[in-house]
Image (cartoon, rainbow, N blue to C red):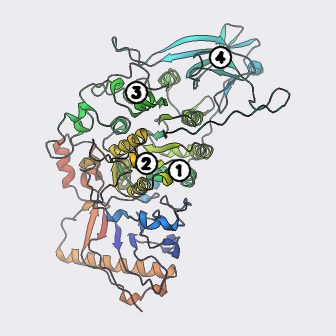
Amino acid sequence: MKKLWYAITWLLRPNSCRCATTVIVSLANVFTLSVFEDKLTNEIHNSWVLFIGAGVLTIFGTYELATRSSFGHVRVRQVPATDNKRYQFHPFENSCKFPLPNIYAKDVAGWFSGERLRQLQCPYEDVDLATMDSEGYMYVHPHHAHYKNVMNDIKCKVVFVEGGIRDNTTKLGHKTIVEVATFEAPENTRFYANGDVYFIRCFNNATQQVFQKIFAGMRDLRREKNKIYITDDMESFDQFGGRRKNPSTKEKPNRYSIDILTIDSTSRTMFMRHMPRTVEMMTRLGYEMFYGYTKVGDNSMVNLEPILAGDIPEALVEPMNDTSGDINPQWILPTNKALDPSLLPFLSKIMEKEYGCKTMFNDDIGTADRGIFHYPSGEFQPGFTTPPADHYYRAYYLALYKNWTYGPCKDGGQIQREFFELWRRFAQRYKDICHFGFTFITTLTHEDGYRLETMDEYLRSSLENLHITDNSVSIIMGDHGNRIGAIQFSYTGRIEERMPLMAIRLPSDFKQLYPMEYNNFLTNKWKLTSNFDIHKTLRDVVRMSFGKKRTGSSSNGRGISLFDEISANRSCRDAYIAENFCTCLIKRTIGNQSKDEIKKREELNKKKFKDTITAWLRVNGLKKCFNYDKITIGKEAATLGINPLVRHGLRSKAKTDEVESARKKEPRMDVSVNKRPRVIAVGR
């Protein structure tokens, strides 16, 4: 059984060495000491440091570290020395000891899903007669008619499209699109097609269609929709190169905006494994990852609804507990009430109706039968009866996926870049206007995670260019980890499946304006959290419930805002996480071992602890801090691991026989921990 040994504590002599006063170390089965990359220096500021791994050691510094961020191996936004004492918290202080897997753990890095694919090569054999620039303006250029098999006299049209809305009477319409207006496309001229969805179609001799492509626009809400507007190439200069008067600077909005980018089936560790350049940029921009964030349901919809809409009456009338006394999944989200998604209390609706904010709902549906809040039929009626946002893109995806089986490439490029582009353009367009944007990218990672890496450079550059959107709470998250790929059968994969990515960046002035809320926010990144907590956090943002206006959100509805203090004693039940999703480590015993075998194993563990710690201290030049002969290991080693329902991948507890069978199975690749570590005085 593969093991991860943790933890040993010891006390350094502050008067003899400028080192950390407390250190927690976890040791993989047999460590090669060359993997220890960092020294403990006087920059640690008496903070806790966690070393944790599964096969290969990875170092995570807490937010008190001056040289490392909580992401590991990337630069941090510096925390002033005066702030350090206010932010001290370590995940081992939680009663729930949730796992922190190695990003490159051997049991996941070796899978097909661990491939490092940096770029897709997409062939293109069509005629490229229309293109969109980074601001959403169109160029139609039929002069490319010299392409092979294309004749002269090419004319193009702009065809505006709407649809994807369910008729409340017929219950149809959610799979269909309608062409609502057609215009001749200006040639070789920059123009704006003022609609969210439209085709560019080109014809040879006005009869034979030689080109068609669907585009996702972003209509100007101040202008008449489904019209064409010709514009200048440069707004700052006239046609003679003369500088025009600069537009007046817009005032900063008096409330924060929200931008959410969700990537399907993406855990924190998978994101860090495949998006290293993006992670570095996120760190520079001040994103914070939440290490104890755990999902409350199995698939996308049940994990996104609690964030976007929160508590709904149809769920709260159900009993909180199931027959076993665990969290009832029907209390999270009912599966048999055919909810109308148009009636859900989305936070975006509050921002739009009460504060005049602009909204976007961008859901990569994959197929016409899918889309969050469209299926299964027992849970939801098929879609919305009115558009749920100012910019709603179901019609775009219906047109895109019609007569096309999904693949990573389309029209000569990686198709998901167009989906990400909507997220970027919306944030850019409304940077000076209150807004709520939600983007959900499904097809990139739903089956396997390795293709996520092909978006690394693109997402990094997008974030770098979006740093000016400083008045927005930006979230990059996963709905859950990989659920259906081979990787989820591994030990680390089971953990990743239940602990999705949650990274949040607050506006740059938030720390100064609301220091108490900011302090809680940073501390809570190491606490056990769930989807309901994210909803409470976003609700605070929507209501601007900070500072003197803050009353606290813990007593009203499910969840605790990240701006409030979350208890270190929080359990999965407290966070409304069912046992089969709960990753809090529990005590495991290995059956069929005699007392002599158990005692021998414990002594071997102690020797491994001491040998590895001693060698590490020598390698890292800390000899002067210790008297090696006086290092002793505490008594009573216990074995901790993820609970058997998690280890064996139960998606629900509906089948009692499967639950009982999982409980009886032997633990595999569990974690060994020194249960009662002795604090050791070290002198020379």
For the residues labelled 1 and 3, the Cα–Cα distance comes to 40 Å
Q: Find residue 679 and report its horizontal and vertical position in percent.
A: 32, 80
Q: Can residue 393 be seen at all in this image of the molecule?
A: yes
Q: Is residue 400 left or right of residue 85?
A: right
Q: Amino acid at mark 2?
A: Leu
Give the residue furthest to the front: 548
- Observer-side mark, 1 or 3, equals 1
Q: Which residue is mark 3?
A: 370
Q: Which residue is mark 2?
A: 501
Q: For residue 388, what is the image quadrant?
A: top left
- Observer-side mark, 3 or 4, equals 4
The label number, if any, that marks residue 509 in the structure image: 1
Q: Amino acid at mark 3?
A: Arg
- Observer-side mark, 2 or 1, equals 1
- Circles 3 and 2: CB distance less than 8 Å? no
Q: Find residue 163 and report its horizontal and vertical position in percent.
A: 47, 17
Q: Find residue 195 and report its horizontal and vertical position in percent.
A: 57, 20
For the residues labelled 2 and 4, the Cα–Cα distance comes to 40 Å
The C terminus lies in which quarter of the figure?
Answer: bottom left
The label number, if any, that marks residue 228 in the structure image: 4
For the residues labelled 2 and 1, the Cα–Cα distance comes to 25 Å
Query: Upstream in the sequence, badge 1 or badge 3?
Result: 3
Q: For residue 333, what is the image quadrant?
A: top left
Q: Residue at x 38, y 64 (%)?
A: 89
